[in-house]
Amino acid sequence: MEKKLEEAIRVFHDGGIVVYPTDTVYGMGCRMDQPNSVKRLFTLRRRPETKAVPVLIDTISLAEKYYTSPLPNNVRHLMKTYWPGPLTIIYWCKQDLVPSLVRGGGKTVGMRQPDHPIPLALIKRVGIPLLGPSANFHGQKTPYSFQDLDHELLAKVDYVLEGECTYKMASTVVNCTRNPFFIERQGYITFPKH
């Protein structure tokens, strides 16, 4: 696996796109700081440019570099309670650090710390957040296993890492731009009704 991780990291540094397993689903990504790679990712996935993409980080401190500060207590609590894990947190971001395309032209970013050794190792060694949308054409079947991946899509990316997805269910997405936060997408994590 070490040689495969090294190759994936080389591909990321060269501006490439990699398909990799996460705790929830198979994702595909590139470095967030490479605009041409981000644009290519949108084109490959046939994703509308007005739709933001999730960003994967490996530590809370890395997330704090991109969210506006100071972070409110409810956001900190969610991060400390559910990360690493299948919770994507949408909050206001530093727009000069998060490309417009990643934000879907908005002022927020959705970030998540996956509970899976492969993306965590990739992010740690690349040193930059990775984009983490599911590895499928926009609106098509979500890939929960390697067998679910579309061969047409695989032929267009630069590298593929195989592995198991732990939860085999999408992350829950919470929007924390208001307090109390609201759920944008129900996924693996459920919250009690208030």
Image (cartoon, rainbow, N blue to C red):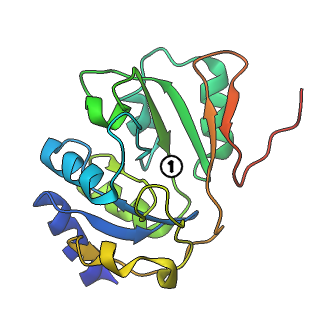
The answer to whether residue 139 is left or right of residue 156 is right
Residue 98 visible in image: no
Residue nearest the observer in this picture, 124 or 27? 27
The answer to whether residue 100 is left or right of residue 83 is left
Mark 1 Cα-neighbour bin, 10 Å: few <14, some 14–19, many ≥20: many
Quadrant of image for the N terminus: bottom left
The answer to whether residue 29 is left or right of residue 84 is left
Residue 71: give x, y in percent of width and height.
52, 19
SS of the residue under disc 1:
loop
Instruction: Tell me the residue at 71%/45% (across/down).
Output: 186
Residue 109: give x, y in percent of width and height.
43, 31
Instruction: Tell me the residue at 41%/65% (across/down).
Output: 135
Q: In the rendered image, which residue does mark 1 sit on? A: 113
Above or below, 58 against 73 in this view is: below
Residue nearest the observer in this picture, 24 or 43? 43
Above or below, 139 against 6 in this view is: above
| Figure quadrant of residue 180 | top right
Residue 104: give x, y in percent of width and height.
36, 32
Amino acid type for the residue under numbered disc 1: Gln
| Figure quadrant of residue 78 | top right
